[in-house]
Amino acid sequence: MAYFLSTLFGSIIPMCVTALVTMAITLIFKTSFTTNFAQGVISAFGAYAVSSVMTSNGLSIWLALPVGMLVSMLIAIVIDVGIFRRGRYVNALGKQIITMGLISIVVGATPLVFGIVTPGFTPFVKGLISFDLADGNVSFPKNSLVCMAMTIVVIALIFVLLRFSKWGLSVRATASNEYVAGMMGINTHIVTAVSWGLAGALGALAATINASSGNSVNIYFMTNYQVFAFLAGILGGFSTFHGPVIAALMIPLANNLVQYVVNTMGKPELTGWSMVIVYAIALVIIFFKPQGIFGKKIAKKV
């Protein structure tokens, strides 16, 4: 039981990071109709900004975080206004290629802006929570609970805004049909710019949470979570906002549980295959549910 609980508590940070990145990618996908392959490096750039502010100004991670989120937000808005707005009628493949090109730009700009350094981070809260069970001790960082609370509040707020605010109605209308939304008086340019900006801020928050847990930071350290987010979108169903986020919670948890199972079976050599097994399970689910677990089949009238 102690090992099982340790596995669950160890899944908190990956679940938080994956959920935030997935929410960001879903917002862009629903409003700009493309998968943003540059989300990972934009998020990492925001984390570099957080670390730079902490180092140069001696600020705490709490005060530096809004700066990093603002930096990523501005980068994302510039991308939408300066690139995607001018190429809004580019086909889906073309838009994806554009985001791939943005990866090279952000990766090249990072050392020019911040220098060739390894960013340093501190946890939001220091210390461990520890308790004993009959079969062993269970301990996990207090930082994990703080990050979980921040993630829940942020994602819950976004869903409340999507459901009850004028902005949320505009996003849902644009996601349904951008052309018709524009005819109904919705400024789709503002909708997409705000969505990109919010996605950038969410990415910086996710990257900072990831870095605060002690993980090594570099410009590519969010790439795996970006891949998880794409998988979550397909598995949960991009036709909804909540489906990808729920799937985003399932993927890192499933990965850790697979590692738990193979270790308890006495097969530690299989831990490197844990994500492969999760992908295989996801492929089976998608085979029977092509629209995703929570996806809806959209019927188009002709």
Image (cartoon, grey):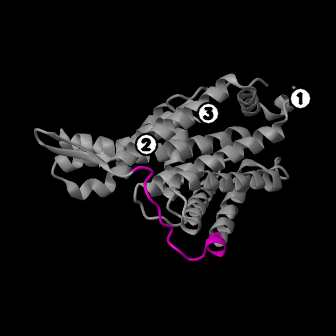
The mark lying in front, picked from 1 and 2, is 2
Q: Which mark is residue 40?
A: none
Residue located beneath label 1 in the image: 183
Instruction: Give the distance between the C-alpha atoms of the residues marked 3 and 2, in whole angstroms.
Output: 19 Å
CB-based contact (under 8 Å), mark 3 and mark 2: no
In this picture, which residue range is highlighted in magenta?
Answer: 110-125
Residue 227: percent from left, percent from top: 51, 52
> Residue 203 at x, y = what percent?
59, 50
What's the residue type where badge 2 is placed? Answer: Val
Closest to the observer, 64 or 257: 64
Query: Is 159 above or below relative to 102?
Result: above
Comparing labels 3 and 2, the label whose residue is closer to the camera: 2
Query: Which one is earlier in the sequence, the residue at label 3 or at label 2?
Result: 2
Indicate the amino acid at tag 3. Ile
The structure residue drawn at horizontal position 47% and vertical position 61%, both measured from the top left corner, is 121
Chief secondary structure of the magenta portion: loop
- The residue under label 3 is 158
Residue type at mark 1: give it: Met
Q: Is residue 12 left or right of residue 40?
A: left
Q: Is residue 147 above or below residue 56?
A: above
Mark 1 or mark 3, whichever is nearer to me: 3
Q: Is residue 89 visible?
A: yes
Element at badge 1?
A: helix
Q: Which residue is mark 2?
A: 146
